[in-house]
Amino acid sequence: MTRRPRDGVRPDRCPCLSGLTFDDCCAPILSGQRRAGTAEALMRSRFTAFALGDRDHLLASWHPRTRPESLDLDDGLQWYRLDVEEISGGSPFDTTGEVTFTAYYRTGAARGTLHECSRFERYDGRWVYVDGVVS
């Protein structure tokens, strides 16, 4: 079951800030109704999964070669903004792709950012997250 945006998240837009509503953007990917068509779409769905605390989607969208056995999310972190900075490959016609982004979070009164270049591959006909370099 796909989680809905929690309190403080506007229901008329997707948490990944694509400009679309949640129902038209990440919800179908998180629920398994649709596959991500690009590496960027998968990365956006993974950000949304972090924002909503959807461990199942995060693990299911991780390459089996690099996926952890379990995933502990910090419920005290509120992910609230995503800036996609660069995309290399990752189109419907590619087999690999990279997405560089900055994700913004708050925890209590503190705020922070995560800057990462994530790598994606096609695996079994779908995009999966391989790993990322945090800078």
Image (spheres, rainbow, N blue to C red):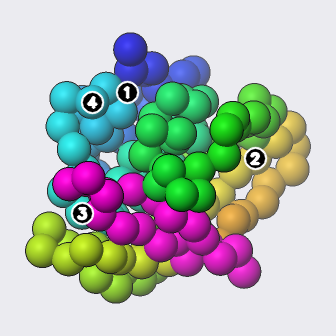
Closer to the chain start, of discs 4 and 1, is 1
Which percent across, then down, holds residue 14?
36, 40
Question: In front of the other: label 3 or label 2?
Answer: 3
Which percent across, then down, holds residue 104?
65, 57
Residue neighbourhood size for the residue with mark 2, other residues' Cα within 10 Å, grouped as few (<14), some (14–19), many (≥20): some
Query: What residue does disc 1 label?
Result: 11
Observer-nearest of 49 and 23:
49
Who's the residue at 65% across and 76% down the image? 133
Query: What residue does disc 2 label?
Result: 106
Who's the residue at 82% across and 42% down the image? 107
Q: Label 1 to label 2, Cα distance in Å?
A: 19 Å
In the image, residue 55 above or below residue 17: above
Magenta range: 116-135
Residue neighbourhood size for the residue with mark 3, other residues' Cα within 10 Å, grouped as few (<14), some (14–19), many (≥20): many
Marks 2 and 4: in contact by CB < 8 Å? no
Asked if residue 120 lies in the magenta stretch, the reply is yes
Who's the residue at 57% across and 21% down the image? 7
Closer to the chain start, of discs 3 and 4, is 4
Q: Can the viewer see residue 90?
A: yes
Query: What residue does disc 3 label?
Result: 38
Asked if residue 130 lies in the magenta stretch, the reply is yes
For badge 1, the amino acid type reads Pro
Closer to the chain start, of discs 3 and 1, is 1
For badge 4, the amino acid type reads Gly
For badge 2, the amino acid type reads Arg
**Quadrant holding the N terminus:** top left
In the image, residue 125 above or below residue 120: above
Q: Label 3 to label 2, Cα distance in Å?
A: 28 Å
For badge 3, the amino acid type reads Thr
Q: Label 4 to label 1, Cα distance in Å?
A: 20 Å
In the rendered structure, find residue 32 and report the number of the disc placed on it. Answer: 4
